[in-house]
Image (cartoon, rainbow, N blue to C red):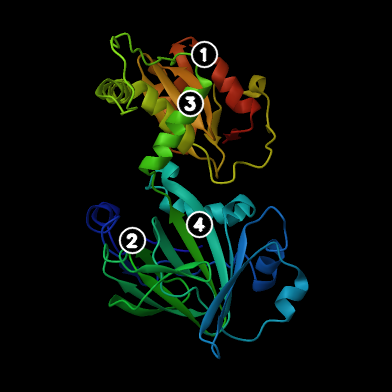
């Protein structure tokens, strides 16, 4: 069993002083680190059509980077040299459920922020070059060692350039310059330059956290409005009482557009619904699930828990609790807030919390739906 990665620093201190602000090094974050996949097993995943993977190489003779996207074939790996290349496989958490125990250590960060777990295998001097990302990432060293350099936060977005399909940077000044050994971990906030180089063969784990952006929100809003019959206000130009031949964009049209957008922005329930539905969807969605028990097998002494790997977010809407799981909405009465908070926090929830009165246990319809979807399991 491996130790808590945040045993060296208080989680509240980390969130207040480092999260989304500045990089942080955790030595021996994991005292022993399970090797979830070997290099051969990771390469096996990269052969699959449904799994996103990339092969990145650096040609030392021509000083040139190259990138290929999977799926790959076995002979693609046999033709590679012994150095300067790396294989990256995305969303391993969706395919290897054993990795969920690793992700459980980061449960103090809302699950709706989680993007995916990427695992990379690199030969000696392999890497992806100097770059920055628009998300938070924890870089955990598995097998082998890597040399990491991390720059000053917030100074990277002016320097990025695309080289052979890779978003890379020019040289940057490092504020962290370290070698990571098995069990060590780096936290890198968004828009922070970083560059990892493998020292011999190595395997690394990247736990990434997405951040919603404005254009995504606008796209979600447009998709919702397109499917909704409640919003269909047309522009009204009854003010027009004289001929206009110059086709100039009129102030009345602009004011109409502003009014419509302002009306939408003043509907927090609508925005909450759209955001929660989207943010409760994991990157790839779930593989088909089977319910492991029947609703009728639940007794008054039972307890249930959400299965690991789900993406969850909830909100209050008037007298109801809306629990969103993988894009689906489940509605509960507000008196069940203690039960729903436990479920949403992946804690064991005694079925007694669904009591409406001392003598009866209520089985809401959407509790049955959670069971039938395979989202919950019974626990002792």
Mark earlier in primary sequence (3, 1): 3
Q: Determine the CA span between mark 2 and mark 4.
A: 25 Å
| Residue of label 4 | 102
Residue 19 is situated, as x and y percent measured from the top left of the image, at 29, 55
**Camera-nearest residue between 241 and 26:** 241
Above or below residue 272? Residue 116 is below
Quadrant of the rendered image containing residue 368? top right
Mark earlier in primary sequence (1, 2): 2
**Camera-nearest residue between 95 and 155:** 155
Residue 298 is situated, as x and y percent measured from the top left of the image, at 61, 23
| Residue of label 2 | 191
Q: Determine the CA span between mark 2 and mark 3.
A: 30 Å
Q: Which residue is drawn at 56% across and 68% down?
A: 120
Q: Which residue is drawn at 28% across and 24% down?
A: 250
Residue 66 is situated, as x and y percent measured from the top left of the image, at 57, 75
**Camera-nearest residue between 163 and 205:** 163
Bin the neighbour count of mark 4 within 10 Å (Cα to Cα): few under 14, some 14-19, many 20 and up.
Answer: some
Q: Determine the CA span between mark 4 and mark 3.
A: 35 Å
């Amino acid at each position: 069993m491996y130790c808590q990665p945040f045993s060296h620093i208080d989680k509240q201190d980390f969130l207040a002083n480092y999260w989304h602000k500045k990089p942080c090094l955790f030595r021996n974050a994991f005292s022993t680190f399970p090797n979830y996949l070997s290099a051969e097993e990771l390469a096996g995943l990269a052969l699959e059509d449904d799994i996103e993977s990339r092969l990145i190489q650096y040609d030392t003779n021509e000083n040139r980077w190259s990138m290929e996207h999977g799926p790959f074939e076995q002979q693609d790996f046999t033709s590679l040299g012994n150095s300067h290349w790396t294989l990256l496989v995305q969303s391993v958490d969706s395919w290897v459920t054993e990795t969920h125990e690793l992700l459980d250590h980061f449960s103090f960060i809302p699950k709706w922020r989680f993007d995916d777990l990427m695992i990379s295998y690199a030969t000696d001097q392999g890497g992806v070059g100097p770059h920055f990302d628009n998300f938070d990432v924890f870089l955990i060293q598995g097998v082998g060692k890597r040399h990491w350099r991390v720059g000053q936060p917030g100074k990277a977005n002016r320097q990025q350039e695309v080289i052979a399909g890779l978003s890379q940077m020019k040289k940057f000044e490092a504020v962290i310059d370290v070698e990571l050994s098995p069990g060590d971990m780096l936290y890198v906030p968004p828009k922070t330059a970083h560059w990892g180089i493998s020292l011999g063969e190595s395997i690394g784990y990247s736990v990434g956290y997405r951040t919603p952006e404005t254009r995504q929100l606008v796209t979600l809003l447009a998709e919702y409005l397109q499917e909704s019959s409640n919003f269909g206000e047309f522009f009204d130009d009854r003010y027009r009482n004289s001929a206009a031949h110059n086709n100039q964009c009129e102030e009345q049209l602009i004011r109409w557009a502003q009014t419509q957008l302002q009306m939408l922005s003043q509907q927090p329930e609508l925005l909450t619904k759209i955001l929660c539905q989207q943010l409760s969807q994991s990157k790839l969605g779930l593989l088909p699930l089977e319910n492991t028990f029947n609703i009728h097998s639940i007794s008054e002494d039972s307890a249930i828990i959400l299965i690991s790997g789900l993406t969850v977010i909830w909100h209050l809407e008037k007298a109801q609790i809306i629990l969103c799981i993988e894009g689906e909405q489940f509605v509960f009465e507000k008196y069940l807030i203690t039960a729903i908070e436990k479920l949403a926090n992946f804690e064991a929830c005694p079925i007694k919390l669904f009591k409406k009165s001392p003598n009866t246990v209520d089985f809401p319809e959407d509790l049955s739906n959670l069971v039938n979807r395979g989202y919950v399991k019974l626990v002792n």
